[in-house]
Image (cartoon, rainbow, N blue to C red):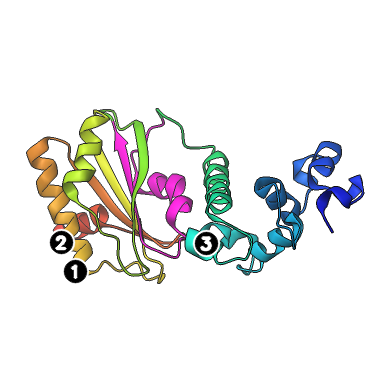
Amino acid sequence: MLIKELPDSEKPRERLLRYGPSNLSNEDLISIILRTGTKNQNVKVLSNLVLSKVKNINQLDTLTIGELIEINGLGKIKAITLLAAIELGKRVSNKEIYTGITINTTELVHKYFSNLIGHSSQEEILVILLNHKKRLINYQIMYRGTITSAIASPSEIYNYAVKERASAMIIMHNHPSGDITPSNDDKTFTNNLISTGKIIGIPLLDHIITNGKEYYSFFNEMILNEK
């Protein structure tokens, strides 16, 4: 049955107008984002196919474009639209992050930013830029990799920092395995960033590895080792 053939009480947009977005089901919200279905299945059926890809709604942001376009009737444009809406929702929900907040402890970094990448199914590298007073200038997820690695270039990261006129930088990346122990590649990457930062004049204040709940701080461990 086509959406237009449904009674108004079952149409997603009409339900939003009548009851408000917070009272809609996950199926209805996705239906509004996707807008239309196909000749063979309406948009609510398509939305349920999307939901069937994950165990719960919290895992929706782990889906890739490739996984979404595997769904019959969900093309690249709909997949891009859905992923953009999911990302926007994540950013809006992170109300504590705003330009100018002071970030001067590892705990604050993890509190503000861990939910952006901590539960991703692939490794992601988040670059956090600060001014000379350790106030936030900007942040960006610059790299996404496989389940085991994310390819990152110190020069590209520092190009971003220079462009934003940052005075200091913090790097955070996730380990999808849940094990926050740094690998040899993590240690090499950190040392390369430290060296590049000394040359450019934008020091790396910390490199944090997270699994969304726990974290490993290179800065804290370096202090502990010195003691």
The tag earlier along the polypeptide, 3 or 1, is: 3
Q: Are marks 1 and 2 in contact (CB under 8 Å)?
A: yes
The quarter of the picture where the N terminus appears is bottom right
120, above or below 109, in the image: below
122 in magenta: yes
The answer to whether 78 appears left or right of 156 in the picture is right
Q: Position of residue 172 (x, y in %)?
A: 33, 52
Label 3 and label 2: CA atoms lie apart by 30 Å
Q: Position of residue 170 (x, y in %)?
A: 28, 45
Q: Position of residue 139 (x, y in %)?
A: 36, 39
Q: Which residue is mark 1?
A: 184
The residue sitting at 58% across, 51% down in the picture is 78
> What amino acid type is highlighted by mark number 3?
Leu
Q: Nearer the viewer, residue 157 or 38?
A: 38
Region in magenta: 101-130
The answer to whether 145 appears left or right of 60 in the picture is left
The quarter of the picture where the C terminus appears is bottom left
Q: Which residue is mark 3?
A: 63
Q: Residues within 10 Å of mark 2 (few under 14, many from 20)?
A: few
Q: Nearer the viewer, residue 174 or 7?
A: 7
The residue sitting at 34% across, 30% down in the picture is 135
> What amino acid type is highlighted by mark number 1?
Asn
Q: Are marks 3 and 2 in contact (CB under 8 Å)?
A: no
Label 1 and label 2: CA atoms lie apart by 6 Å
Q: Which residue is mark 2?
A: 188
Which SS class for mark 1?
Answer: helix
The residue sitting at 52% across, 61% down in the picture is 63
Quarter of the view holding residue 222: bottom left
